[in-house]
Image (tube, grey):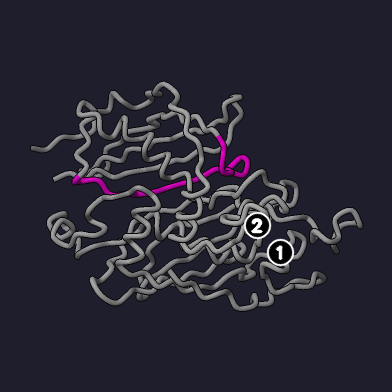
Amino acid sequence: MTTTPDPAFAGRTYPAGPVHTVSAAKIGEFARATGSRSALHTDVDAARAAGHADVIAPPTFLVSLAQATEAQYIEDPTAGIDFTRVVHGEESFTLHRPVVAGDHLVPTLTVESIRAAGGHAMVATRVDLADEAGEDVASVRSMIVVRGD
Amino acid sequence: MTATPATPSTPAASASSSTPAPSSAAPLVLADLSIGQELARTQHEITRDTLVRYAGASGDFNPIHYNDTVATEAGLPGVIAHGMLTMGSAITGLLDALGDPTLVRAYSVRFTNPVPVPATGSVTLEVVAVVGALDESAGTARVDIAAQVDGTKVLGRARATIAPSAAAPSTVGQGAAA
C-alpha cells in the first residue's frame, strides 16, 4: 500500500508540551557518541567556571527532543507518511541561548510545508523550544523526503 | 568515535591581525578571523559500534542503522550512519577550536549522500571548517563545513553561525583586540 503525505496538515501547529527536563547524563552520552570532547559537556565544575548553571548541551543535542515531538505528526496514520520511505533531507538548529542540564523545555511542533517534488514529497517541520517562562530557547527545523514509487 | 585534532590554521591573507592557532586553550576571537581561514580539519572513524552508541544516546533506533537486512530491503547499500551522527560529528572540530561549544548559534546541513558503515572495520569522515563570512555588526561569523567520505560529499550547505568573543577572555575590559 502506498500512502502520500496529506497536504492538509501543512501549517498545522500542535499543542505545546509536554515539558522536558534536560538530563546531564543524556548530554554526556550524546557528547561522547558524537565525539564532542569539551569538558563543559561532562564536568559541572568546568561548566560553572565558564558561567553556565550546569553542563551544556552539544549544538545538535535537541534533535532527540525534536524528533520525539515530531512523532505526534509523523506517526499519525492520517498524516499519510510511510516511514519506510522516509529519507532525512535537511536539519537546522537555531540556538538562542545555551541549553543546560536541568532546563525545563516546552516543545511546540509546526508542520511548515508539504510539497510534491519529482514524485516525492518534501515535508518540513519546525519544533520551537521555550522555557517555562515562555522565553525562546531554540528552534529545530527538519525536512524529510517521502519517496514516491 | 575518535577525532584527530585540528592542525594549526592555515594562515589567511590578513593585513594586520595575528592568526593564533585555535585550541581550547586559546579560544577564537572574532577580530582575528578572516574569510577563507581554516578553523578545523578533522577525521572521524565511524564503526558499527559508533552507530550503536549514537542510537542509544539519541534514542534513534531505526534499524537501517544496525540491521543489514532491513537496510538492504529499504533499498540502501547496507547499514548507514544516522545523518544526525554525521551532522553532530562534523562540527566537533569547530567546537574544539572555539573552546566553548555554546558559541555556536546556528547549524544547518543538507544530507546529500548516505554513509554506509561496514559490519567490521570503519569508514572515515573527513571534515574541514572554513570561515565563509563575517558579520562584525552582529558579532558573528559563518563557518562553512565540508564533510566527505571516500571523496564523496555527505553533507551539503553545512554552515554554522558562531559568536566568538570580540577579544580574548583575558583581555576583556582592557580594550578591543586589534
Inter-mark Cα distance, 1 to 2: 8 Å
Q: Earlier in the sequence, mark 1 or mark 2?
A: 1
Query: Amino acid type of disc 1?
Result: Pro
Residue under the point 57% across and 37% down: A103
Q: Disc 2 designates what residue?
A: B100
Query: Amino acid type of disc 2?
Result: Asp
Q: Nearer the viewer, residue B77 or A31?
A: A31
Image coords of residue A23 (percent x, y): 50, 43
- Magenta-span inclusion, residue A65: no
- Magenta-span inclusion, residue A98: yes
Name the subunit of mark 2: B
Q: Of helix, strand and loop, which one carries label 2?
A: loop
Q: Which residues are magenta?
A: A84-103
Image coords of residue B5 (percent x, y): 56, 74
Q: Of helix, strand and loop, which one carries label 1?
A: loop
Residue under the point 25% across and 71% down: B118
Please tell me the numbered disc located at residue A16.
none
Q: Disc 1 designates what residue?
A: B27
